[in-house]
Amino acid sequence: MYTGDLDADVADGSVLSDDERARAARFRFDRDRHRFVAGRSTLRSLVSSYLGIDPADVAFAYGPQGKPFVLGSELSFNVSHSGGCAVYAFARGVEVGVDVELLEHSRYDDGVAERFFSPHEVATLEAVAPETRPDAFLRCWTRKEAFIKARGEGLSLPLHEFDVEFAPGTRPQILRTAWSAHEPAEWTLSDISGFCPGAIAALAVRSAEAEAIFKGSIC
């Protein structure tokens, strides 16, 4: 796992594909364009370091919900960013997902929780002290997002159909899925906020014995 600052990282447009350059050109503001190019060029550099090829030669394919992967490779990866903060996660042979949310972007809304969280999660959220609910909300949200991103399904997987543990003092984990009694035990869910100052972040890996290893900051 790596972290980066998209406002400070080098934005090397020379390694991007034609479609990535076209996407970059559509950004109206320079800051957003820089963040996109920095994120994609950094991802290409990291993937190339695992595959032993040039960053410009990395050929991404995309799943039905837009999750990128490299054809013919066991390398699994996922990226999340909030503002200028970026997190890059990698694994081999297993699914991986990551999500990060800046605390300054936190806007707790019990209506959002009731709409997207499971009844168990809503009850957990209501049980914490009111002043800590914004952070608790983000702990739940990032863990759920990391899980669905790892599965590559995006919001086509209803968020209320599975439960994550996020109560203070408890171990992050998948508690329940509506479609399988056995799947929760296949996953490791980790709180990686300690690697992301000023943010709440989570990592999901489809392995019962996975461990989050911080490789370093890109910037």
Image: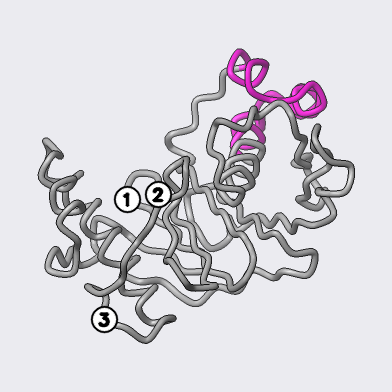
Pointers 1 and 2 in contact (CB under 8 A)? yes
At x 24% / y 51%, what residue is drawn?
36
Kindly identify which residue carries mark 3. Answer: 54
Query: Label 3 amino acid?
Result: Asp
Q: Which numbered marker is on residue 219?
A: none
Q: Calculate the distance from the C-alpha at mark 3 to the C-alpha at mark 2.
A: 24 Å
Q: Is residue 105 left or right of residue 93?
A: left
x and y, in percent, of residue 2 in the image: 46, 69
Viewer-nearest residue: 31 or 18: 18
Are the residues tagged 3 and 2 within 8 Å (C-beta)? no
Mark 3 or 2, closer to the camera: 3
Residue 161 picture location, percent across and down: 74, 29
In the image, residue 212 sits, relative to residue 128, either above or below, namely below
Q: Is the C-beta separation of discs 3 and 1 under 8 Å?
A: no
Between marks 3 and 1, how big is the CA–CA gap? 25 Å
Residue where numbered disc 1 is placed: 84
Sort mark 3 into few (<14), some (14-19) or many (20+) by Cα contacts within 10 Å: few
The C terminus lies in quadrant: bottom left
Q: Is residue 114 above or below residue 16?
A: above
Picture residue at 44% right of the left edge, 81% below the top: 50
Q: Is residue 79 magenta?
A: no
